Amino acid sequence: MIHVENLTKTYAGTTVLNIPNLEIPKGESFGLVGNNGAGKTTFFSLLLDLISPDSGKITSNNILISTDEGWKPFTTAFIDETFLIGYLTPEEYFYFIGELRGRKKPEVDEFLQRFTEFFNGEILNGKKYLRDLSKGNSKKVGIVAALIGEPEVVILDEPFANLDPTTQFRLKKIIREIAAQGDVTILVSSHDLQHTVEISNRIVVLEKGEIVKDIQTTVETMKELETFFAV
Amino acid sequence: MVKMFFSLEWKSFVRSAGFKANMFIKIIMVLAALYFILVFTALGVGMYYILQKQGLPPLETVNRFLIIYLLIDLVIRYFLQKMPVMNIRPFLVQNISRKNIVAYSLGKTLFSIFNILHLFLLLPLTIVLIVEGFDPAGAIAWFIGVSSLILVNNFLNILSNNKSLVLYSIAMILVAVVLFTYYGILDITAYTQPLFDSLYANPVLVAIPVLLLVFIAWITFSFFLKNLFLDSGLKEKKSDAQTENYTWLNRYGVLGTFIKNDIKLIKRNKRSRTTIIMSVLFIFYGLLFFTGGIEAYEGPVWRIFAGIFVTGGFIFTFGQFVPSWDSSYYPLMMSQNIQYREYLNSKWWLMVIATIFTTIIASFYLYFGWEVYLAILVGAVYNIGVNAHLVLLGGAFIRTPIDLTNNKNIMGNKQAFNSKTLLLTLPKLILPLGLYVLGHYLFEPNAGYLMVAGAGVLGFALKNKVFTLIEKIYKTEKYKTIAAYSQKA
């Protein structure tokens, strides 16, 4: 599905990302872990053509991301609060995203029903604009919006951060359900090793912009990661 | 302590994202400030002699109009003076007393150009008075008294920016004064003149304005001190949100989706709401030209200038900042399933609708003759055909992020309508003036209108070509724009 070749990104002489080769097959749930500054967000921003690579290329479904916008219809993402429109209510935001992805209001409404538990009654009909929601609640909105319109590629940067423990469990369940469908490629980055292990069938560890580990999740994975990060 | 605050202030000024890019504008602003200082000083020195030459008693005449001067000062301050912006939150838990924090933020405002400028008028005037043989004690008392009132304005402005009660009271008093004076019911100057006169005649009375200043400074101080909590004064005001669907726009597809969003953008953010207010003010700006209120504005060339202005308010105040309005969620827009053309098209339609709307409202100018309204119609055609494209083109290069929520904070600043907007507006006005002059003086008066309107129609006809060009520029500028927007202003 996603194919990365000789990808580098340099800021002021420092190479922040250098991936010679990476292949992410369709339907994989891909976990990206690494310390601060490892290049996780840079990689995701490149996948979304928000920054331009210094060399190399990324193709998604054989579409070259940096020149062709054809990846947009089947790709969604929630990176940070710049993906939210502060002056909209959550409902309006969902409808806006829905309309851009060719989903009418009733379809979006039906879709949102699946997330009643995840929202925990704090999102819909709340008489609040997104800019007035707490960090955790606005994160819920961003994540759910990224699932509207049956995308084939979903990119979530640090989805667990700022969520309360209960919501973290619910999010893991949601991600596992999507992964179980088998046709959605889902890319998640996180600082939380346990969460990543639970939701991913493949984990890639980035360090200073380079891939230092690429493992299929097994029972031993958690231990392997812990040894790696415990310095 | 003050030294530390000062160094922070300096750093925030020098390190702000727009510092370098705005150098040119900063220079222009410094020049403008120097110009005003010069004018004020010249006026301060010369006023005495000018009034004397006119056969008017200088000090009494000045005193008579002083109240109007002060009231106008207050209005100008409200619209232009920036509020003390200091990021207060990080200081709250530091080892700094709350009193110090408040005193510093308020003390800073005293050194605003809006206070200092008056000194350049008052000081020379006072010196001239003394030189011309007025009682030095009286003259100095008068100077101190008037300066105190200027500073009272400073605090009134701060209060009215934060307490709507103060704002509405002042606004009501102002409206009442203007109406009473206009209809000749009451001449407020006749009542206030003796008050200012007595400052000179009886220097001890200077205690009254000084005490007034101390009093209002203390009120402002305690107001801020009392509200220096995260859940009161520093809390952002939240209004109840209501989901609005505007389903009637659905039939326009993606265009409708964007317009829906833009309507909400304008409606729900103070910063963007101001553009509507400014557009309305622009409509009335033409009155200056067509009523012969200002002599310099007579003559046919200015008509077209007015025509552009009257109908172009929305284009100049809103269109100018496309796509910066969407800066806070630009990465979303860039990764969604959106074609640039549709995005630009929706902004373009918004400008067209607003221009047509203002043209209809401006039909009251027919009162001044059909020629006047013709100028406005021609201006509208030019605005839609050419200026709407120009602002979209310029927008690709502006890249100044707009913080929509900025106005909400108690210590937030007002950046809605600044010198930059005006500066960017000028080229869009000079071109049609040139076209008109060409037609008017080479052929005949109506040919000038034809030239300008023709340019508008031509621009309109080329819309698709222009859009392709603009789209291309937006695409090549994409990464730079995203990077610039991710820096906080």
Image (cartoon, coloured by chain):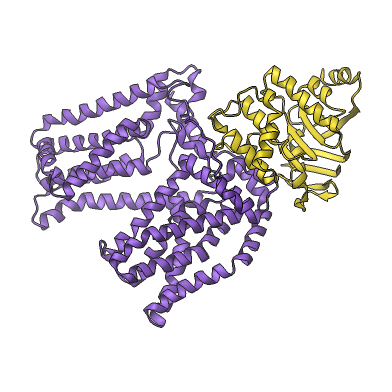
Chain colours: A yellow, B purple
- Percent position (x, y) of residue A210? 83, 34
Q: Quadrant of residue A116?
A: top right
From the viewer's perspective, tell me whether residue B281 is left or right of residue B123: right
Q: Is residue B161 depicted above or below B388 in this figure?
A: above
Can the viewer see residue B203? yes
- Percent position (x, y) of residue B360? 40, 60
- Percent position (x, y) of residue A29? 84, 31
Rendered-image quadrant of the C terminus of chain B: top right
Count the labels in the image.
Answer: 0
- Percent position (x, y) of residue B288? 30, 60
**Residue sitting farthest toward the bottom:** B443
Can the viewer see residue A13? no
Name which residue lies at 32% across and 35% down.
Answer: B157
Q: Quadrant of residue B244?
A: top right
Q: Is residue B456 depicted above or below B5 in this figure?
A: below
From the viewer's perspective, tell me whether residue B471 is left or right of residue B356: right
Name which residue lies at 19% across and 31% down.
Answer: B209
- Pick the front one: B388 or B124: B388
- Pick the front one: B422 or B26: B422
Name which residue lies at 55% across and 67% down.
Answer: B460
- Pick the front one: A86 or A90: A90
Name which residue lies at 76% across and 38% down.
Answer: A44
